[in-house]
Amino acid sequence: MEHSMDSFRSGFVAIVGRPNVGKSTLLNHLIGQKVAIMSNRAQTTRNAIRGVMTRSDAQVIFIDTPGIHQPKHLLGERMMDAALQTLQEVDVVLMVVDATESGIHKDAPVLELLKDVTTPVYLVLNKVDRIKKEQLLPLIASYHKARSFQEVIPVSALTGTQLDELVQLIVEALPVGPKYYPDGMVTDHPEAFIIAEMVREKVLHLTREEIPHSIMVDIESMERRSNGTLYVNAIIYTERTSQKGILIGKDGAMLKRVGELARHELERLLGMRMFLELWVKVKKDWRNEPSMLRRIGLSE
């Protein structure tokens, strides 16, 4: 059923929380496909990732922010700046917490960040499929002692439990407004950003603890040729020579595997054939170099 634009609702929703509480998984499930990379490693998300959900009666623009943490370098500072900026531009804030981790002391930095926020804040208790029902009410009570929440919604981003209810509460809170993005558009990030993030995700998955978050992926060139194939050259920057060796692997096996996995998923996501060529370079202390951060969209 189509709704009149006089009653159509639209707005922006920030997803905030500590690293590794399931924010990107939540965003991807809400949108219905991957728009944010996922990893069980902390601080996977670096930029504010926008995902667009369009219904007949509403359009919700979700913004997945970097995990709230204590910055240790310029990269971390820029990530926190991105999260803070987002809170001032939205209609609803979702504070996502991991229900499997006892005690709210771990979420103290997030609560501190939100203490002066006047935007409605919803407490989203994620991973409730992994706890006993009798644990839920005491957990909710402990968060209510810390601050007042507009809504409290227990969900599972992995299984989809109660996500429809969460979306309905959000839509009801949004103002009447225009459709900001066309139907079918799920993110406003350009192809180059999506490709770089997908390559970074595959590096994190394949290297596990061997390669920390000291890598960045820079798209050197993109060209769509007459045969319909997208040709992409990308550089994976790391901070140490030893990490470069791990990323390349014996006879180039690791780099080849990263490229294969990223290309297969990107071809499905972007709906086109792709030729992806990857290189690895060492750039010491790049996380403290402003020019490098600008290349991944984290400007001052």
Image: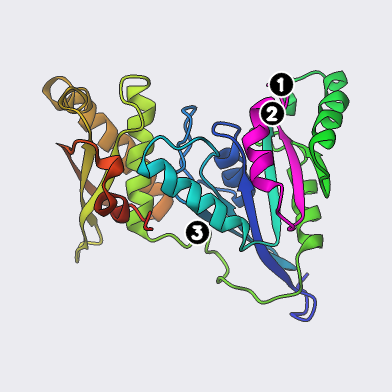
Q: Amino acid at mark 1?
A: Arg
- What is the magenta range? 98-127
- Viewer-closest of 218 and 70: 70
Using the image, tell me which numbered label, if any, was put on residue 187.
3
The first of marks 3 and 2 along the sequence is 2
Q: Quadrant of the C terminus?
A: bottom left
**Residue on which the image places disc 2:** 127
Callouts 1 and 2 close, C-beta under 8 Å: yes
The first of marks 1 and 3 along the sequence is 1
Give SS at disc 3. Answer: loop
Mark 3–mark 2 Cα distance, whole angstroms, equals 25 Å
Using the image, tell me which numbered label, if any, was put on residue 130.
1
Q: Amino acid at mark 2?
A: Lys
- Is 112 left or right of 195, judged from the image as shown? right
Mark 1: give few (<14), some (14-19) or many (20+) Cα within 10 Å. Answer: few
Mark 1–mark 3 Cα distance, whole angstroms, equals 30 Å
